[in-house]
Image (tube, grey):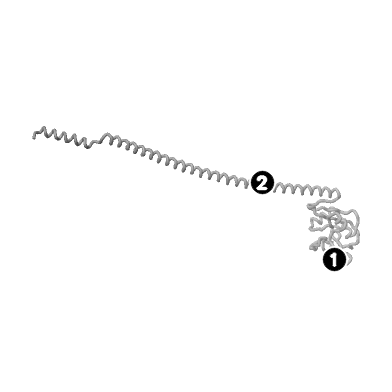
């Protein structure tokens, strides 16, 4: 066999192999169609995944922002409540001060009117007390009734300053004071029931005479018969 025949056969065999291994036009078109579908599916999946990721990010962002806004609103609400409580407390405090000021004003106004009324009637003001010197002579009991009819009582002298005040407004004249031992001889008591602890007796006084049971002030004190008639000093507290 010559070489040309061998080459012819080899070429025929190659062409047959190529023909056998080459896809048919129908198969090639089908493969292309499948490939296009697959690409579309991949692209669709990528787009879907991207959309899901974007949606999740948006949901997370919105949810996070919602919580932040909610916290801010809660904080602002609490602040408003706190401010409202403070304003209410301040309002109540101002209201209380207003009522206290109003009450104080009414008390001062009442006190002023009371003092002026008594001053017009001859009373004398000293600190928180008012004093009235009677112009008529009466017994000790009558003098006390006279004072009580005016919302007062016979004077109670509590200290040296008040005794000096009495001497000043009476010029040292004789006046009944609210002191007696009528209930028990030798046990001197003021008209409010309190016991005498210290006094301003004249030397040798009181004399402990059974008929001298009432105290008379004349610069210093003397015990005298309660039926004797003298002027008296009434005393009342302004309030």
Residue indicated by mark 1 = 183
Q: Counting residues from the N terminus, which is met first, the one under dot 1 or under dot 2?
A: 2
Q: For this rendering, which residue is in front, 19 or 54?
A: 19
Vertical comparison of 235 with 58: above or below: below
Q: Are marks 1 and 2 in contact (CB under 8 Å)?
A: no
Q: Mark 2, residues whose alpha carbon is within 10 Å: few (<14), some, or many (≥20)?
A: few
Residue 208, percent across and down?
86, 66
Whole-percent x, y for residue 219 in the image: 85, 57
Q: Which residue is mark 2?
A: 91
Determine crowd level at label 1: few under 14, some 14-19, many 20+ residues with C-alpha closer than 10 A: few
Residue at point 34%, 37% (across, down): 37
Q: Position of residue 176 (x, y in %)?
A: 87, 58
Residue 8 in sight: yes
Q: Position of residue 57 (x, y in %)?
A: 44, 41
SS for callout 1: loop
- Residue 135's place in the image compared with 62, above or below, is below
Q: Nearer the viewer, residue 123 or 211?
A: 123
């Amino acid at each position: 066999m010559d070489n040309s025949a061998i080459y012819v056969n080899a070429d025929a065999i190659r062409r047959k192999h190529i023909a056998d291994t080459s896809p048919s036009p129908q198969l090639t078109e089908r493969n292309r169609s499948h490939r296009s579908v697959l690409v579309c599916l991949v692209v669709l999946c990528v787009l879907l995944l991207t959309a899901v990721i974007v949606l999740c990010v948006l949901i997370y962002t919105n949810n996070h922002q919602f919580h932040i806004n909610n916290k801010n609103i809660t904080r602002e609400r609490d602040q408003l409540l706190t401010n409202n409580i403070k304003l209410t407390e301040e309002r109540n405090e101002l209201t209380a001060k207003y009522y206290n000021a109003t009450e104080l004003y009414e008390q001062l106004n009442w006190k002023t009117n009371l003092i002026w009324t008594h001053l017009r009637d001859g009373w004398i003001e000293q600190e928180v007390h008012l004093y009235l010197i009677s112009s008529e002579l009466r017994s000790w009991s009558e003098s006390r009734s006279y004072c009580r009819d005016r919302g007062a009582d016979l004077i109670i002298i509590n200290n040296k300053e008040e005794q000096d005040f009495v001497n000043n407004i009476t010029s040292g004249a004789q006046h009944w004071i609210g002191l007696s031992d009528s209930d028990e001889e030798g046990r001197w008591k003021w008209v409010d029931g309190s016991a005498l602890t210290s006094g301003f007796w004249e030397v040798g006084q009181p004399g402990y005479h059974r008929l001298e049971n009432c105290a008379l002030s004349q610069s210093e004190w003397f015990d005298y018969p309660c039926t004797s008639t003298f002027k008296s000093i009434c005393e009342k507290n302004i309030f």
